[in-house]
């Protein structure tokens, strides 16, 4: 039997660490040919090697993403290297934490640049090509914080709330031409990016029914599901994978 994602080419931004890395590994395990994008060459090499050792197919595309130009360049390179992109996972993100009065304009621009502008222009480049071929899937990674009024995470939450709304807009725009656009909204998840949080991550996670942080692999399961045909009737959904935190 063919694998669920054989014949599928996928681009995962921020695929060198945490949730993106787990998503790249899972998509490859299901048969996709994966382009893993990130800044760090060594981490890129490591994930490509891990996927190769498991029998999958992956390549690393280095990209420091911050604006429309960097997004367009990455999209071009992914199409060049993979032939086409059928699945786009907009995962790369930054999540600074702190009082509003301490956030600088540079912080603001970095957060909205990577979390909103880059997905926007990757979709602008790649979704029309998917639509021309009559199919594709885009999965945006948002956060439970996009739905909660949290202290010290307003800037980050606002950027992901924008991405959640874009998920629905793009579903309306590209869905009729066969491109499914959805989002996965993780709760507290142990990654390199949250390593410095230590016990604060456990305390945050303790407020939800699961009572613990998630693993990158648990988030990746949802991403892989939305990427494949088993999610064929799902458009414009923002799927919470947050241990139930936003349900209570
Ligand atoms: P992480 O471990 O910090 O990994 C971040 C990834 O993004 C890395 O691959 C990193 O590449 C890449 N990246 C960062 N800045 C970049 C830039 N300027 N250009 C290109 N790539 C860049 O993060 P994570 O915890 O897995 O989070 C992944 C996504 O999930 C983010 O969008 C985050 O907002 C969201 N999320 C995370 C949690 C959580 O608790 N962890 C919860 C909700 C939502 P390098 O390896 O090259 O640095």
Image: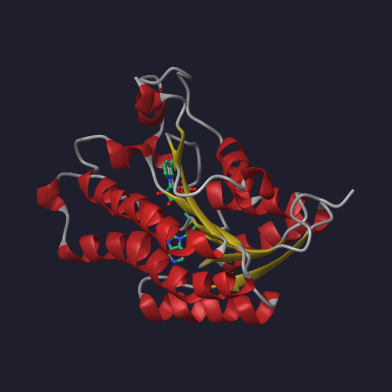
As displayed, is residue 145 above or below residue 200? Answer: below
Q: Is residue 35 left or right of residue 6?
A: left
Q: Of residues 111 and 139, which is closer to you in this image?
A: 139
Q: Is residue 221 left or right of residue 246?
A: right
As displayed, is residue 60 above or below residue 19? Answer: below
In this picture the colour scheme is: secondary structure
Q: Indicate the quadrant containing the C terminus: top left, top right, bottom left or bottom right.
A: top left
Query: Taking the image as drawn, is residue 18 in sight?
Result: no
As displayed, is residue 50 above or below residue 10? Answer: above
Q: Is residue 211 left or right of residue 101?
A: right
The percent position of residue 234, horizontal first and vertical second, equals 54, 45
Residue drawn at point x = 34 percent, y = 67 percent? 117
The percent position of residue 43, horizontal first and vertical second, equals 60, 60
As displayed, is residue 62 above or below residue 44? Answer: below
Query: Taking the image as drawn, is residue 40 in sight?
Result: yes
Residue drawn at point x = 24 percent, y = 43 percent? 153
Q: Of residues 188 and 75, which is closer to you in this image?
A: 75
The percent position of residue 242, horizontal first and vertical second, equals 45, 31
Q: Is residue 95 left or right of residue 241?
A: left
Q: Quadrant of residue 246?
A: top left
Residue drawn at point x = 50 percent, y = 42 percent? 191
Q: Quadrant of residue 136?
A: bottom right
Residue drawn at point x = 67 percent, y = 43 percent? 230
Residue found at the far right of this picture = 1
Tell how many labels: 0
The percent position of residue 51, horizontal first and vertical second, equals 75, 56
């Amino acid at each position: 039997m063919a694998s669920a994602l054989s014949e599928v080419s996928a681009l995962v931004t921020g695929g060198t660490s945490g949730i993106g890395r787990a998503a790249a590994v899972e998509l490859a395990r299901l048969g996709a040919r994966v382009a893993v994008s990130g800044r760090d060459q060594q981490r890129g090499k490591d994930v490509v090697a891990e996927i190769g050792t498991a029998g999958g197919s992956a390549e690393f595309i280095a990209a420091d993403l911050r604006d429309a130009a960097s997004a367009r360049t990455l999209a071009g390179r992914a199409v060049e290297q993979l032939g086409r992109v059928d699945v786009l996972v907009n995962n790369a993100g930054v999540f600074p934490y702190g009082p509003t009065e301490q956030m600088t304009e540079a912080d603001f621009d970095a957060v909205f640049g990577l979390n909103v502008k880059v997905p926007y222009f990757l979709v602008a480049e790649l979704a029309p090509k998917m639509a021309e071929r009559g199919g594709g899937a885009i999965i945006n990674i948002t956060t439970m914080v996009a739905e909660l009024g949290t202290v010290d995470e307003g800037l980050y939450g606002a950027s992901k709330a924008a991405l959640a709304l874009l998920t629905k807009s793009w579903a309306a725009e590209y869905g009729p031409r066969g491109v499914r656009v959805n989002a996965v909204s993780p709760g507290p998840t142990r990654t390199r990016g949250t390593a410095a949080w230590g016990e604060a991550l456990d305390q945050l996670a303790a407020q939800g029914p699961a009572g613990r942080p998630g693993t990158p692999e648990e988030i990746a399961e949802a991403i892989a599901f939305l990427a494949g045909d088993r999610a064929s009737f799902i458009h414009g959904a923002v799927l919470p994978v947050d241990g139930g935190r936003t349900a209570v």
